[in-house]
Image (cartoon, grey):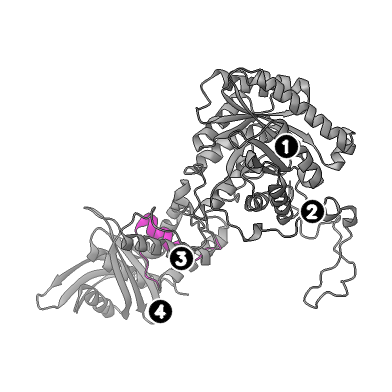
Amino acid sequence: MTPRETTEFPTLRTPSGAVPLDAPAWNRQRPSAMPQHRYQPVHDRVALPLTDRTWPSRRIERAPLWVPVDLRDGNQALAEPMDTARKRRMFDLLVAMGYKEIEVGYPSASQTDFDFVRHLATSDAVPEDVTVSVFTAARHDLIDRTIASIEGLPRTVVHLYTATAPTWRDVVLGRSRAEVHALIRDAATHLMRRAGEQPGADIRFEFSPEVFNLTEPDFVLEVCNGLTELWDACADRPVIHNLPATVEVATPNVYADQIEYMDRHLARRAAVILSVHPHNDRGTGVACAELAVLAGAQRVEGCLFGNGERTGNVDLVTLALNLYAQGVNPMVDFSDIDAVRETVEHCTRLPVHPRHPYGGELVHTAFSGTHQDAIAKGLAHHAKQAAEWGLPVEEAPWAVPYLPIDPGDIGRTYEEVIRINSQSGKGGVAHLLHTHHGLDLPATMRPDFSRTVQRTTDADGRELSHKDLWDLFYATYIAPGEGGPVGLVSWSTADSGSGEHHFSCVLRIDEEGQERHCQGTGNGPLAAFTDALGTAGFAVDIIQYTEHGTTTGPGSHAIAYAECRVNGVTCWGAGWDTSLLTASVRAVAAAVNRAEGGAAR
Ligand code: KIV
Ligand code: ZN
């Protein structure tokens, strides 16, 4: 799609209603013409009986039981559903990551799902400590088909669901509240009977009152408590009551209130696993799940990277890593998040957004100059602290600005942390030159190079790799030492032994069109060199000078940085050579050539 011009939005109507009378002077927003009166607040749609909530002051100190439903919910919602090979890949990924209860399909809904459950039942794909769950609607024939699919699987959960909210009862099912209750009990009884007929099978039960969040709380309790009793749940053989926010309709605090209410009122509470299944229609699925756990939920159903119907199920990646970032063990492994992401992308054929929390390609990358500067300082400080504590960097406590967790912990490299474009600053540029090329630019040289980088990125709008940065640094500061208006054709230096150094050179001065022999003396080779330059009419003061090795071992390069005032013009130059002396002479020569060539203008 071609982007529209800024003036070209004919269907938008800039809000023009009267500014509310009670609006403060600093808020001039006007009502838009959109028909918001068509929608009702959740408080008018469902009773919310809890007022003395306790969840806001609780903390999450352990991970809930995670149950990925990617192979059902995620799969239902795919334009191209997963085939058996893709499903198996996803299942193996979930097992490898450490999930212990995995919903593997809706076997009565499609042959593919049925076949996949059979595949699991007849292969050795399901480890000893993993329970598979299968989903079914509350109909005898569908329950029978579901039971047939799990034959041979040693441990399973059969997950029964029926919509319970008034709109669904009236519009979709065409049944009264009592009729829906009877339908659920009848299906649950049938399920219990059929499960009892499977010798040696360990089949547990789960019930979901679909659209729990819009169902009358007393009706949910009536149905769930009835099933707990019917299925004779006990602490050793608990029933799962899964309370979905099937379509997210309220702020997360409302869902949390609903869950705390259920937590307090469910009968035989020790015999019930309170589970939640938030969707993400309002974009707050993660917050709903987190607040629900505070409110008493013990189990969370969701999908990796938030796949699923419409805006998806709650994202299990974000939930787990949010806990991790608080120092709570997530009980699943994300140490190679890119492998997880790539597998999910392969199976779902859907891309993960580059800014997706934790797993997106760009989420550990800083382009902004101030952020880069802070991160570069933070990383250096972290390394220093780790050394002081005698800890490897990957073990030391983490406190680096703008990076909530160490990218290394989830298999990311530091390379992607700092990237250079026109928004970037001196800190980031210096960090990349240091990390990849061993350059430790003097603090006062950094703004100078940063301006050059900015001019380049502004001019062509593209991002610079660390290699591009090195090339630019070389062209700007080092290359001028190898030629320019004042060419250093040859040179030599000697130490008289009494602290006096002699410098003799041949200069090719463009303006003069001929070579000139010059001599100089000083208390060091550079002082002698500037003295020699003076005899050729170049008054050179070295304002700052530093040097260091860039690598170690034989044949490694040294770099020298010199800031010089040349006939009143101040410029930086750099020299890079295996000989430190050569590097230093070239650095001064580069500064002279840059000044004479007009670099400072
Ligand atoms: O979103 C939902 O309500 C569901 C359940 C039926 C578990 O997927
Ligand atoms: Zn769902």
Q: Which residue is mark 3?
A: 427
Range drawn in magenta: 422-443
* Residue type, numbered disc 3: Gly
Task: Label 2: state its secondary structure.
Answer: loop
Spot occupied by residue 327 in the image (x, y as percentages of width and height):
49, 54
Q: Residue furthest left?
A: 497
Give the quadrant of ligand 2.
Answer: top right
Q: Which residue is mark 2?
A: 48
- Dot 3 or dot 1: first in sequence order is 1
The answer to whether any part of residue 485 appears in the image is: no
- Dot 2 or dot 1: first in sequence order is 2
Task: Label 4: state its secondary structure.
Answer: strand
* Residue type, numbered disc 4: Val
- Dot 2 or dot 3: first in sequence order is 2
Observer-side mark, 4 or 3, equals: 3
Query: Is 380 inside the magenta-drawn segment?
Result: no
Report if the CB atoms under discs 1 and 4 are less than 8 Å apart. no
Question: Which of the pair 414/254 is nearer the observer?
Answer: 254
Please report the residue visible at 74 percent of the width from the left and 38 percent of the height from the top. Answer: 224
Observer-side mark, 2 or 3, equals: 2
Spot occupied by residue 411 in the image (x, y as percentages of width and height):
46, 46
The Cα atoms of the two marked residues, 2 and 4, are separated by 75 Å
* Residue type, numbered disc 2: Leu
Q: Which mark is residue 208?
A: 1
Q: Which residue is mark 4?
A: 569
- Dot 1 or dot 4: first in sequence order is 1
